[in-house]
Image (cartoon, coloured by chain):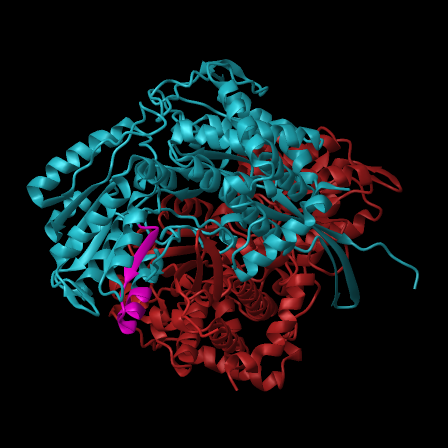
Chain colours: A cyan, B red
Amino acid sequence: MSLFEKHRATFERAQLACRERHCWSPYPELPAKYPDAEAAQAAGRAAFRAHLGQRFALDQPGAVGELGEEVSPYTQQPLGVRYPQAEVDTLFDAAQQAMPRWAAASIDTRIGVLMEVLDTIYREHLFEIAQSVMHTAGQSYNMAYAGSGVNALDRGIEALVYAHQAMQAVAPSARWERRFGPAQIVLDKTYRLVPRGVAVCFSCASFPTWNAWPSMLASLATGNAVIVKPHPATVLPMAISVRVFRRVLAAAGFDANLVTMALDTVAEPLGKRLVKHPKTAIVDFTGSVRFGQWVEQNAHPALSFTETAGCNTVVLESADDLDAALRSLATTLCMFSAQMCTSPQNIYVPAQGVRTPQGRVPLDEVARRLADAVAALTSDPKKAAMILATLQSPQTLALLAQMQEEGAKRGRVLLRPEAYAHPEFAQARTSTPLMLQVGKDARDLYGEERFGPVSFVIACDDAADALRQATADVKQFGGLTAFLYSTDEAYIAQAEAAYAQAGAQLTINLTGPMPLNFAAAYSDYHVTGLNPAGNASLTDLSFVASRFRITQSRRPAPLTSP
Amino acid sequence: MSLFEKHRATFERAQLACRERHCWSPYPELPAKYPDAEAAQAAGRAAFRAHLGQRFALDQPGAVGELGEEVSPYTQQPLGVRYPQAEVDTLFDAAQQAMPRWAAASIDTRIGVLMEVLDTIYREHLFEIAQSVMHTAGQSYNMAYAGSGVNALDRGIEALVYAHQAMQAVAPSARWERRFGPAQIVLDKTYRLVPRGVAVCFSCASFPTWNAWPSMLASLATGNAVIVKPHPATVLPMAISVRVFRRVLAAAGFDANLVTMALDTVAEPLGKRLVKHPKTAIVDFTGSVRFGQWVEQNAHPALSFTETAGCNTVVLESADDLDAALRSLATTLCMFSAQMCTSPQNIYVPAQGVRTPQGRVPLDEVARRLADAVAALTSDPKKAAMILATLQSPQTLALLAQMQEEGAKRGRVLLRPEAYAHPEFAQARTSTPLMLQVGKDARDLYGEERFGPVSFVIACDDAADALRQATADVKQFGGLTAFLYSTDEAYIAQAEAAYAQAGAQLTINLTGPMPLNFAAAYSDYHVTGLNPAGNASLTDLSFVASRFRITQSRRPAPLTSP
């Protein structure tokens, strides 16, 4: 049975989900539901520990040395994993040599092999990757399993579905007949899908696999090779991934060099050289706004697909159950210490307060109750550990200190950040959130992404002004998600239109246990491409359709006897 | 009946043709087959003549003066048409204001209105446009009807089919249900298609409507507005088009300013300002390699779709019927004096000659027989007028003189260019083709597009060298089409692979009355995007899929009683 046949049922189910955009996943959503969960989790922990202090074996060409500077946010100790540093030109040459055979394979063959890659990650490396995400990105165990594990796998399948759709739309051949004057011309035409070339995929420090897997799969499914460039702080999850890709590709009879890894250090970054390399045909970038914008401006002639960050906004106009709304907001502000590109930052509230069935709740009270809700979530270290996890980078602590000082001068500190004692890792880099209340005039403070657990409650003239300010943030600074609480249907309709223009994905009046910024594979589009938070959307047709090109040849059909 | 219903049958037939890529068109392929042809042609001529020396009425905003410097290549007299010159910022503002209502219309509504535009051009303006193409671009009457008329309309429908396909792939809404802990979360999601913004569409001097109509339709179908920037030498066909778009849009209840025209002069070009305008979201460019490359490099943050030019190549390795091959090549070298982006220029022949069933025909003889075939086509002025038509630009005459002088020094002049006496227009700007025979060392001569009736027979070491040289031209200088004659299936397979990598559309062993470079709508992909001849393909999904973005909003589903 071919690999495509092996995975056909799952793939077709995923196609249906993408078409209808309902909730579906082939994977268990919680670690405890994984088959033989305890043994699998223990094996994953053991596999992760076996990497520590070791040389990571990656049999790719061009090794010129070793690199490795990862530090666990949980232990604040170096992982000690040493990865091969490869000569960049060698990687590009090897990638180019690997492509023709892969590009010549059928669409279904490529899809089958890539589904097998995802399945292998799921069956054999999921908990190893979850542990490695914890100890590099600093995520909680549950988030590392779900967000960086099964949800990222789902998004990979989703990318394959769209790549398949775009490629299947091209007829492989045609017979074309037309009369020209006295003659009937009969041509046989064949159409070939030709990959662009070598793709470079940058993965980020805090959420390495989530965009990287779908980006890699979009490029590979369409016949390209991929060089992965992980953030130097978060290499291990991508190194394990690259090794699985290579192993499954080779086992299927293809050149493992379709997927390789280029490594750098914070001190000597390699990014610009990779983007401007003459053999780079595609760049996928997840990371900082600054470098993302540089990529967008400088990738040409390579295509670029970027997802960076922005000022995600909340508008709190009115609510039937204000406490439920504030609890949901508080949860989302705390989730992974707001180190997600979808975390809210700027909370706009009318100066007159928020309308509720019990009357208008004054702005200061709303701010205080929101801060109380955050404090309630984070006061118990065990709960705090589950939701806040750790801070990926020490720079975030410095940012919190600086923002607190500035915020105290310019407004009011609603909640002071403090380290909390992680119940399992005494040395974990932790902090409870910083919350500030400011006026619109503090735009220099809130008018850019402050990466980490920092949020601003911002007083606005009125409801219309709140919406205007919030959507202006999105347009100017970028925005991926947006959150609205209102009982006024006319106001909701205005907000839907305004956020659609600004290009942020809007969640309205959601309360309850679902994190407000939860992005469902097969259903939620991530990033619109309409504002500075990124130029691509994971996953729509435009994310895949230009990764391959169509060439054709035509010739007179063979004469047949009548 | 809605406009979509009115055109549904044609549109669905076009969808089938795009899927299967067979030969189809709703339009008669020859002027004589047009309904009530004589009267329609007379009316078209009269409508064209009525423009001459007049002010072209275009009720768009921002008029600040008048421009018009068109000269007929047939009479070498100014047309004297004066067009409104518009203030660019006003056009952008008007375009932006026009968009929300258009973007809010259903996909089918937009498709219906745009099908009506094409139908109106066909029914009411086809011969007027054909005459205006003749007297600006210099095409023959038949080509102006077919290539700039019905074939361009077909390509417009084709763009609509792909735009429809990309937009229809997005579900308009979904219900999403998932359990989070104790709670069942039920969300209603709505997905909106949001246009990018204002598109700028550059049309070229020699083939104004052919790419411009599909580009305009791709942008408009996906909800954007379009500002057309015609080449100052060839304004009238686009001015008539713009007026039809505006009239049909307004009659359908939309803002006519969805389509406007920005005009410049050769002396004071406006192109860079339009591309870099902060409100430009999309650029479609057909024209010179130099400006096309500037567009690709500088359009960001706007998307760019370019089609420029290149060195289209011929490889003549062997033939069953060499004369038939040479006749077909000769026809294609003469067609519209090779002022088509698909015209061949560089003809690679092994030094040992071409294999035929009668034995190897020496290179010099092949070159001479090809030149004789061209001379035979062009010696009779009536036939010459039909096939060569006129030279769009006086610069082409200067190029011919310069190339003849250089070519005589570096190789052999196979055919000297001479003005021929056009039987209908005594003052027509005409020339028979220049043909040169050179060695590979004359790459400085043939290693770029020489726009006009110039071709080079180039001696190669052997068949393998011919293919290597030809595909190297495509990669380095760009190439849209390629032509191969060979009876060796292994060589053909190599050539198919090599040209697919280089990204030129290959035609193999075609003889007979069909022009070798004929590009069939719904069947042939034009430009691959794999070499410097352009970054887009008319039309595939990637030509349309990024012209709109997807935004979403989601909210808890209303509670329903069980």
* Quarter of the image where one finds residue B410: top right
B417 relative to A98, above or below:
below
Camera-side residue of B232 and A549 = A549
Residue B161 is situated, as x and y percent measured from the top left of the image, at 57, 66
The magenta region covers A479-497
Residue B312 is situated, as x and y percent measured from the top left of the image, at 61, 45
* Quarter of the image where one finds residue B462: top right
Q: Residue at x 80, y 41 (%)?
A: B318
Q: Residue at x 80, y 37 (%)?
A: B490
Q: Is residue A107 magenta?
A: no
B245 relative to B2, above or below:
above
Give the mark count.
0
Residue A378 is situated, as x and y percent measured from the top left of the image, at 27, 40
Residue B101 is situated, as x and y percent measured from the top left of the image, at 36, 73
Q: Is residue A488 magenta?
A: yes
* Quarter of the image where one finds residue B352: top right
